Amino acid sequence: MIILAAIVFLVIVVVMMGVKVVPQQRAYIAERLGRYYATLQPGINFLIPFVDRVAYKHGLKEQAYDIHEQVCITRDNVQVRVDGVIFLQVIDAHKASYGVNDYVFAVTQLAQTTMRSEIGKIDLDKTFVERMAINQAVVQAIDEAAISWGVKVLRYEIKNISPPQTVLMAMEKQMQAEREKRAVILESEGKQQFAINTAEGQKARVVLESEAEKLRQINRAEGEAAAILSVADATAESVRKVAAAISEKGGMEAVQLQVAELYIEQFGNLAKEGNTLILPANLGDMGSMIASAMTVIKETTPKK
């Protein structure tokens, strides 16, 4: 019974050694008597016990690996410390097993050397701006070499670029100077624009004031002209009415009476204004004086 149990156990062990279950997104490399035999795909695979063996196991998922921090020298001779992360994927398990001893170590070392080379091509000021271009250059350089290793480099990302403390202080001073310069420029531009706007406002005010003064003078002139015409029309109308009244019956007698009254009234005013009164020689002949005045009136009165 003990021997039978041992035989059964041995059979079970042999069967288990001959059956390999490969998980999804995994690839096993099987060797037969030390030579490459097959790449086992996900699922159940059968091997010959003690003849075949699984030599390598690879994951086919995308994998991320840290690129350790290293010192790089820029084109303007500034030392910066750079680290990153690289994303890989095994696309050929056979090449990944036999093309290189350790594809992860090989790719990370190649990424570091390529990064130093790319950083050395640019100045420090451009390292922060050209990160995308640097990433693409590293991916392209590594991917060309990694094809023979059965590995696909999907992308590379720079995590940190750390200049020396002295350089950081100098960069901070430079940025502060640039900000102050922009502030001064903006302030001067603001003052310039303010002066321009003020001048344009004053110009517009002067133009409007001159236009208003022009309209005011035009309106005043038109008003004065209209007033003169109105006075002239009224005077002419009064003269016409007086002339018409004189021409009517009894008009001359009314004029004689009016002249006499005005004559007497004016002499009365002269007597009130001063102690000395000069009288004409013919003051006693009132009739002759009125007759003279009427003669003038008759001559100036238009005849019908």
Image (cartoon, rainbow, N blue to C red):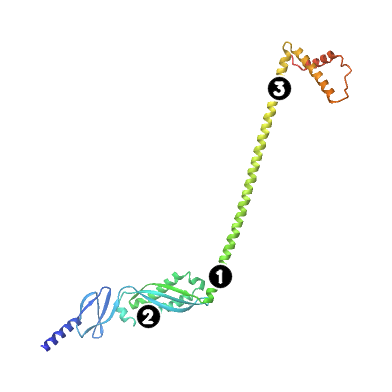
For marks 2 and 3 on the same chain, the one whose residue lies earlier in the sequence: 2
| Label number found at residue 190 | none
Assess disc 1: are there few (<14), some (14-19) or many (≥20) residues with their C-alpha within 10 Å of its C-alpha: few
- Residue 13 image-quadrant placement: bottom left
Q: Reply above or below: 286 against 88.
A: above
- The secondary element bearing badge 3 is classed as helix
Q: Nearer the viewer, mark 2 or mark 3?
A: 3
Seen from the viewer's position, the closer of residues 184 and 76 is 184
| Residue, far top | 249
Position of residue 271 measured from the top left corner of the image (x, y, whole percent): 84, 22
Q: Which residue is mark 2?
A: 106
In-image side of 267 versus 210 (left or right):
right
Q: Which residue is mark 3?
A: 236
Q: Reply above or below: 195 against 251.
A: below
In-image side of 72 versus 60 (left or right):
right
Position of residue 189 measured from the top left corner of the image (x, y, whole percent): 59, 58
For marks 1 and 3 on the same chain, the one whose residue lies earlier in the sequence: 1
For marks 1 and 2 on the same chain, the one whose residue lies earlier in the sequence: 2
Q: CA distance from mark 1 to mark 3?
A: 91 Å
Which residue is at a point 84% across and 25% down the rendered structure image?
273
Mark 3 belongs to which amino acid? Ala
- The secondary element bearing badge 2 is classed as helix
Position of residue 18 measured from the top left corner of the image (x, y, whole percent): 19, 81
Q: CA distance from mark 1 to mark 2?
A: 40 Å
